[in-house]
Image (tube, rainbow, N blue to C red):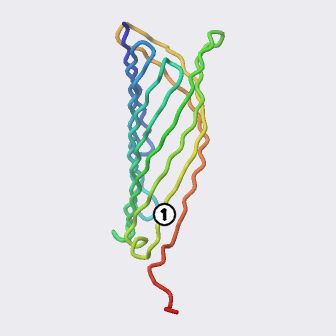
Amino acid sequence: MKKILLFNVCSIIMITSLFSQAMFVDEGNAYGFAGYYQSDEVEGGKSTTIAGMGSYLLNGNMEFQVEYDMGSIKSDAGSDYDMTANGLGLGGSYHIKNESLPFRMKVGGTYSSLTFDNDILSDAGITMSGTSTGFGGGIYKTVSETDSYSLTPFVNFASVKSEVKVKHISRVKGPAR
């Protein structure tokens, strides 16, 4: 019974961003865990995003994933303008193993929903929510392997469409008839 631990850490220097991923593989089934942190100075404030994801790869072919996202914007104009966002995402990928190719491929999709909160919007009876859908794929190949670990870099691409809806909930009742 061979157990492999895959680990990938990527850091981008130009912005404060960190992505980390690890996967435990046991006889074709795999359990993956990933985390993401990003903090940026934006016009008028600071934006922070934190996400965590778990995935399960069944028999080396079908991958199911769930993700939780948190975000915040801290405004330089005051805390009344600060905003938070929370969301949940689901996704899946199919891994293609073709021995005639020098690499393996995967294709998949995701769906996520977000809710936004802000004091000014709440006081005005306004709600904001969003959804995103994505489709993507990637290629990967094991480049180094021992009895205790395997190093497998991935090159992925994705196309994501997002939509945010703003809805006003009237709290004022109309005139009595």
Residue lying furthest right: 100
Q: Quadrant of residue 165?
A: bottom right
Determine the secondary structure under disc 1: strand
Q: Nearer the viewer, residue 82 or 62?
A: 62
Residue 47 point in image, percent of width and height: 41, 55
Residue 176 point in image, percent of width and height: 49, 92
Residue 97 point in image, percent of width and height: 59, 15
Q: Quadrant of residue 23?
A: top left
Q: Residue at 49% across / 51% down in the picture? A: 113
Instruction: Using residue 79 as the reference point, say whether residue 97 is left or right of it.
Output: right
Q: Above or below — where is 97 with respect to 31? A: above
Q: Quadrant of the N terminus?
A: top left
Residue 95 point in image, percent of width and height: 56, 22
What residue type is disc 1 on?
Met
Q: Nearer the viewer, residue 114 or 50?
A: 114
Residue lying furthest front: 177
Q: How many marks?
A: 1
Q: Nearer the viewer, residue 146 or 11?
A: 146
Q: Quadrant of residue 107?
A: top right
Q: Residue at 38% across / 8% down in the picture? A: 2
Q: Residues within 10 Å of mark 1 (few under 14, many from 20)?
A: some
Q: Above or below — where is 165 with respect to 7? A: below
Instruction: Using residue 155 as the reference point, say whether residue 79 is left or right of it.
Output: left
Q: Above or below — where is 7 with respect to 144? A: below
> Which residue is tagged 1?
128
